[in-house]
Image (tube, rainbow, N blue to C red):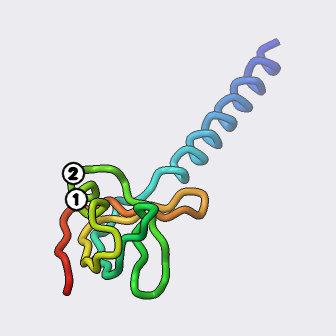
Amino acid sequence: MKKVTTIALVVLMVALSLVGTACASETQAPKEEVVLKGTVDANNRFIDESGQTYEMAVNDQAAKIMDQPGQKVEIKGTVMEKEGVKTVVVKEFIALP
């Protein structure tokens, strides 16, 4: 009986350590601030100079940009990617000529 209990305990500990490792790998590293130049399209997406499309996380700064479709802007913020979709969190921006 002791042997079965010991084996069950060891299996449980191994399973828990594997779950902890899997969860740790899903956490994201702190986002690095980026500077992007491009325009906002009619669908409120930001398209940088290389043609990469970003969704914009809704915040006060993004709302100001979304009111200006077609405007060239420089954005400072962070980029997140989930399931192949890039989203920019705008911290600040300036309109470009």
The answer to whether 61 is drawn above or below residue 52 in the figure is above
Element carrying mark 2 = helix
Question: What's the distance in space between the residues labelled 2 and 1, CA to CA?
Answer: 7 Å
Q: Which residue has dot 1 on it?
A: 64
Q: What residue is drawn where x is 37% and y is 63%?
A: 88
Q: What residue is drawn where x is 29% and y is 76%?
A: 71
Q: Are marks 2 and 1 in contact (CB under 8 Å)?
A: yes
Measured as percent of width and height from the top left, residue 92 is found at: 18, 65
Foreground pick, 11 / 88 = 88
Foreground pick, 25 / 79 = 79
Q: What residue is drawn where x is 26% and y is 77%?
A: 73
Q: Which residue has dot 2 on it?
A: 60
Measured as percent of width and height from the top left, residue 26 is found at: 54, 51
Q: Residues within 10 Å of mark 2 (few under 14, many from 20)?
A: few
The answer to whether 21 is drawn above or below residue 9 in the figure is below
The answer to whether 47 is drawn above or below residue 18 in the figure is below
Name the amino acid, label 2: Asp
Quarter of the image with the C terminus is: bottom left
Report the label total: 2
Element carrying mark 1 = helix
Q: Residues within 10 Å of mark 1 (few under 14, many from 20)?
A: few
Measured as percent of width and height from the top left, residue 68 is found at: 28, 67
Give the side of residue 35 with respect to residue 83, left or right: left
Name the amino acid, label 1: Lys
Foreground pick, 5 / 97 = 97
Q: What residue is drawn where x is 32% and y is 59%?
A: 89
